[in-house]
Image (cartoon, rainbow, N blue to C red):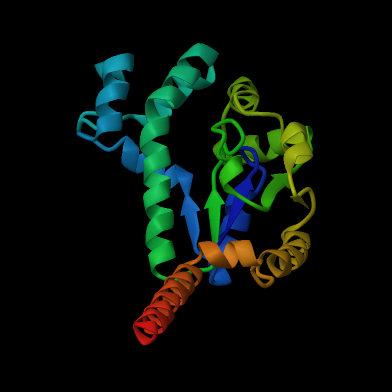
Amino acid sequence: MRIVGLTGGIASGKSTVSNLFKVHGIPVVDADLVARDALKKGSGGWRKVVAAFGNEILLDNGEVDRVKLGRIVFSDPEKRQLLNRLLAPFISSGIFWEVFKLWMKGFKVIVLDVPLLFEAKMDGWTKPIIVVWVDPETQLQRLLARDRTSEEDARNRINAQMALDLKRSKADIVIDNTGSLEDLNELFQKVLFQVTKPLTWTEFGLSRQGAFSVLLSVAIGVLICRKFYNDGL
């Protein structure tokens, strides 16, 4: 099984690339969706976050006000690190479970869409690693246009993440998304060809089919050995 790491920065276009994988039949495990589940009312993550940040982060229905929580953690690095530490175990286990379900279904290529892939040390799970990159000014202008927020808030949110230039230096594949959507689609086709090429023997061994092949080979080997042993008696 090939687990592809997909990351980028806020307003870099990572979600667009993630959707392109889905359109082409490649399953995607979205860490943001897993994180939302980890914060659902009554969950273990919800209880830890409410205990740490107080009831003022809750909506009237008891769910976490993600916008309010976001403003708190994006402007305070210590609180952001605290939130990440509280949710990391729940997000990691949630991602593992989603990958396992796709493995059981027999998928050979899976994309992990994780904004904090490097920060959360999940890059060791994935190969290749794809970074969707844009230059800082393009990132800022796209974020301002998308969220209609203040420039200060936008810069706080960008600065809360690892710099895209640093992420790019750690990538196996870089998608430069400073151009048009048509340019992105053209670049994506080349990336799709790379990630869907035949599995290596190691990757095949980690797939469900590979595991079954190994088990079948072992079973056949055991039967042959038993036959030789019985014939010799």
Residue 100 picture quarter: bottom left
Residue at figure coordinates x 53%, y 68% from the top left: 108
Residue at figure coordinates x 68%, y 53% from the top left: 128
**Picture coordinates of residue 32 (x, y %)?**
46, 43
Query: Is 86 on the left-hand or right-hand side of 124?
Result: left
Query: Is 162 on the left-hand or right-hand side of 87?
Result: right
- Total marks in image: 0
Q: Quadrant where the N terminus lies?
A: bottom right
Outermost residue to the front = 233
Query: Is 46 on the left-hand or right-hand side of 120?
Result: left
Q: Which of 102 and 134 lies nearest the eye of the viewer?
A: 102
Outermost residue to the bottom = 231
Residue at figure coordinates x 54%, y 49% from the top left: 113
Residue at figure coordinates x 51%, y 70% from the top left: 210
**Picture coordinates of residue 169 (x, y %)?**
78, 38
Q: Which of 26 and 139 lies nearest the eye of the viewer?
A: 26
Q: Which of 17 and 85 lies nearest the eye of the viewer?
A: 85
Q: Is residue 186 visible?
A: yes
**Picture coordinates of residue 142 (x, y %)?**
67, 40
Residue 72 picture quarter: top left
Q: Quadrant where the C terminus lies?
A: bottom left
Q: Is residue 35 visible?
A: no
Q: Which of 182 and 221 lies nearest the eye of the viewer?
A: 221
Residue 206 vertical placement versus 97 (above, below):
below
**Picture coordinates of residue 163 (x, y %)?**
71, 29
